[in-house]
Amino acid sequence: MSRDARWKALLELLVERGRLDVEYAAAELGVSAATIRRDFDGLAEQQMLVRTRGGAVVHGVSYELPLRYKTARHASEKQRIAKAVAELVAPGEAVGLTGGTTTTEVARALAVRGDLVSGAPALTVVTNALNIANELAVRPQFKIVLTGGVARAQSYELVGPLADGVLGQITVDVAVLGVVAFDVTHGAAAHDEAEAAINRLLCERAERVVVAADSSKLGQRAFARICAAEAVDTLVTDTAAEPEAVRRFEEAGLRVVTV
């Protein structure tokens, strides 16, 4: 396993558990304790974790793993979800995409749809995610609208009043939200309040709202609320979603698609 792959795996384990000791991490990754100690020291130098005696901890309970370090966990689920979300978009529509790993997969699924290879434009994509705009800008049949704003290193998303200014002047047919948590009572949420504010505005400018979230996000809470569950028209998730959670979303008036 390369150092980069180890660092990604260690950071994901750390986010899940909050704390790691050297011996446990070495056993999980199948490497020596000395290797893990060097990895922890390297990650601490980059301020990705806090080194402790015998291990490491995250910076705090609201710690957010930077997008560039997120690995392919739930990758197959996200790809299935993305394909299903892409199929909800009609040619010629204006689509709003927030940042995140799942919405990035949605962008890729839209890019390879056979009925979107031509048009004037085939789609209009509005996004505040630099990586999504970068991937889709090479598709001449897509009109790409990138909001202004200040870039967040964790998610490649543009936030702040400059982004507000653009979103306040447009409307979209569908907004696709990537979330870190989605709960019937507490709604859709993000780690960062500035991201949540931009996502909320995008929802307000949309005719319909789709949440694309793998089952691990359901029933969870996060710091910054984006919108109420009732503001969402469709939830697309994977088949590992708990039937009770699906039922509660449906009772709240959402269409739930499991793939």
Image: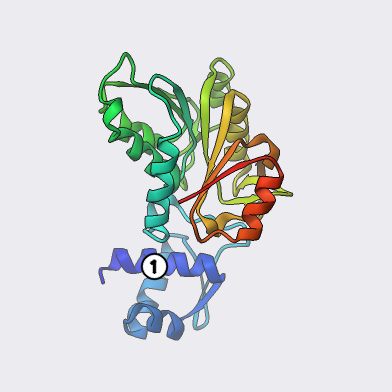
Instruction: Return the residue nearer the eye: 211 or 125.
Output: 211
Percent position of residue 33, x then y = 37, 85
- Secondary structure beneath label 1: helix
Percent position of residue 46, x then y = 42, 60
Please report the residue visible at 45 percent of the width from the left and 83 percent of the height from the top: 24
Quadrant where the N terminus lies?
bottom left
Residue topped by disc 1: 9
Percent position of residue 135, x then y = 31, 35
Q: Quadrant of residue 116?
A: top left
Instruction: Return the residue nearer the eye: 39 or 139.
Output: 139
Vertical order, 40 against 122 (above or below): below
Instruction: Return the residue nearer the eye: 203 or 236.
Output: 236
Vertical order, 186 against 109 (above or below): below
**In the rendered image, is residue 219 in sight?**
no
As drawn, the residue found furthest toward the right would be 185
Please report the residue visible at 34 percent of the width from the left and 39 percent of the height from the top: 109
Under mark 1, the amino acid is: Ala
Vertical order, 54 against 46 (above or below): below
Percent position of residue 176, x then y = 51, 36
